[in-house]
Image (cartoon, grey):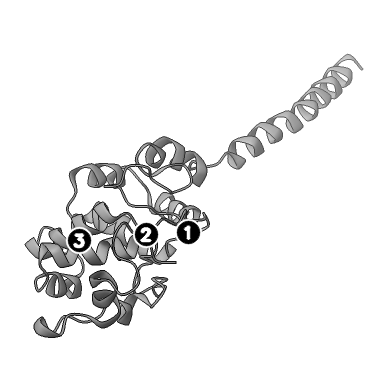
Amino acid sequence: MLKSFKAGLFLLLVMGFQPVFAEETAATEAAPAVNSPDKVVQNVCAACHGADGNSVITTNPKLAGQHPEYLLKQLTNFKDGSRANAVMSGMAGALSQEDMEGISKYFSNQSIKLAKSKENGKGSLGEKIYRGGIAATKTPACAACHGVTGAGLPKQFPRLAGQHTDYTVQQLRTFRTGERANAPMMATIAAKMSDAEMQAVADYIQGLR
């Protein structure tokens, strides 16, 4: 009888511990494998681009409202080296594919803060280049790909409306020199533009809405 009692007690103890083990296992399996997009943004992106994607540093692009497909492509290009930038290559290099997809969707869902052009409003050189191109050098109109309002086309061309003038000029120049080589079409276009033309159209783009 003593042996039967001990055996029964042992069985109850084992059965009593099983739910605890099961709960611990379930808790471990449920732990997230990666950080949530908003945490990654706060830790990696916010210092330069703002938590809401509206950078206050004019040489850093606004990311708010940008097409997620475009953002993901740029992060991928920074990571694989096809778009050269020492800072961004280092940042993207530490991100997983899931991180990059999450960041892209996060910023695309933010609202961009629009701005105003300084000198290139209606009837300006900037507007003429954006809407009609430059006939003398056969430079196509920006609107042909990015839209009259600068909204761009998802999966093909980025949104431009409201982007900082300084950043847009900077990118046009790197396209012209070949430093930025992940958009051959833009390299061909920028090669035909003078500094004054780049400045004018970039200023117009800043005020687009």
Q: CA distance from mark 1 to mark 3?
A: 26 Å
**Which amino acid, mark 2?**
Leu
Q: Is residue 36 visible?
A: no
The local secondary structure at tag 2 comes to: helix
From the viewer's side, name the closer residue of 165 and 189: 165
**Which amino acid, mark 3?**
Gln
Q: Are marks 1 and 3 in contact (CB under 8 Å)?
A: no
User: Total label count?
Assistant: 3
Sequence-wise, the earlier of marks 2 and 1 is: 2
Q: Are marks 2 and 3 in contact (CB under 8 Å)?
A: no
Q: Where is residue 89 shown, x and y percent of the image?
A: 23, 47
Sequence-wise, the earlier of marks 1 and 3 is: 1
Residue 71 numbered mark, or none: 2
Picture residue at 21% right of the left edge, 82% below the top: 140
Q: Is residue 18 visible?
A: yes
| Quadrant housing residue 153 | bottom left
Q: Tell me: 2 left or right of 139.
A: right
State which quarter of the image contains the N terminus. Answer: top right
| Quadrant housing residue 77 | bottom left
**Which residue, as the protein is rendered here, is positioned at the far right?**
1
The residue that label 1 is drawn on is 108
The residue that label 3 is drawn on is 199
| Quadrant housing residue 32 | top right
Q: Tell me: 159 left or right of 191.
A: right
Q: Residues within 10 Å of mark 1 (few under 14, many from 20)?
A: many
Q: CA distance from mark 2 to mark 3?
A: 24 Å
